[in-house]
Image (tube, rainbow, N blue to C red):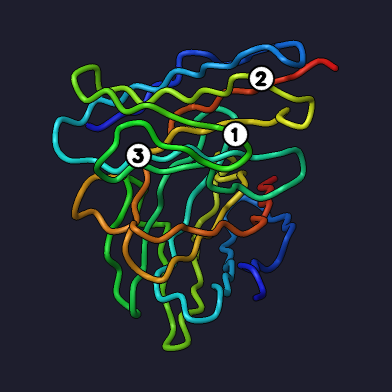
Amino acid sequence: AQSVSQHNHHVILSEAASLELGCNYSYGGTVNLFWYVQYPGQHLQLLLKYFSGDPLVKGIKGFEAEFIKSKFSFNLRKPSVQWSDTAEYFCAVNKDNAGNMLTFGGGTRLMVKP
Amino acid sequence: KAGVTQTPRYLIKTRGQQVTLSCSPISGHRSVSWYQQTPGQGLQFLFEYFSETQRNKGNFPGRFSGRQFSNSRSEMNVSTLELGDSALYLCASSPGTPLYEQYFGPGTRLTVT
């Protein structure tokens, strides 16, 4: 069965530190890849997505992610985090021809200390 | 544009009862997906409806069912509730294909006692 792994469950950073959150998936076919964020008390919202083309995708709020097909990875990065980035981050995979069905990773809780 | 709305927001039920949750998608969106979120299992896909037809189904028992109406509103039903069904149930709507962003609602917090 397809699975999505996020290696870091909890991350604590100071403001201005760089962020990289890992995401690996197990499905070998064509996939669409997503990062979602859930700020405290708010809905899940889309940060960025990859369908095809340039494997380096940019999203909202200065986030970017790189798709490395050979490593089945889609890591999220931000060069300099802010206190307002404190949230839970979810990687998700959608198999081609599977409608809108998303398989989510377990999530990473990020705390940014001011 | 109004977002995805889910009702009720909170619900307490007893084991063995059944429950119906409702989701109103963003106007014009034809796809509605349901997810269960728990601390132990994370976010798990339940099912997706598109134009009143179930398009995908996750790995949940038959006690979990859903439907979609002609106005795209969707309901999910859980029969014979178990303690393990306590969770946040999220609904997401989309115009159709994964090329479009899915918008998530605030969820319904179900507690089974």
Quarter occupied by residue A103: top left
Query: Left of A95 or right of it: where is A16?
Result: right
Q: Earlier in the sequence, mark 2 or mark 1?
A: 1
Disc number placed over residue A80 in the picture, else none: 2
Badge 2: chain ID = A
| Total numbered circles | 3
Tell me which residue sits at (69%, 48%) in the image: B111
Identify the element where label 1 is drawn.
helix
Report x, y in % for residue B110: 66, 52
Residue type at mark 3: give it. Leu
Q: Quadrant of the N terminus of chain B?
A: bottom right
Report x, y in % for residue B35: 48, 50
Tell me which residue sits at (51%, 41%) in the image: A59
Marks 3/1: CA–CA distance: 18 Å
Query: Left of A72 or right of it: where is B99?
Result: right
- Residue situated furthest right in the rendering: A114
Q: Relative to residue A93, is residue B17 depicted above or below?
A: below
Label 1 sits on residue: A62
Other-residue count near label 2 (Cα within 10 Å), few / some / many at <14 / 14–19 / ≥20: some
Which of discs 3 and 2 lies nearer the camera? The answer is 2
Q: Relative to the observer, which residue lies in front, A68 or B6?
A: A68
Residue type at mark 2: give it. Ser
Q: Relative to the observer, which residue lies in front, A100 or A67?
A: A67
Identify the element where label 3 is drawn.
strand
Label 3 sits on residue: A33
Other-residue count near label 1 (Cα within 10 Å), few / some / many at <14 / 14–19 / ≥20: few
Quarter occupied by residue B40: top right
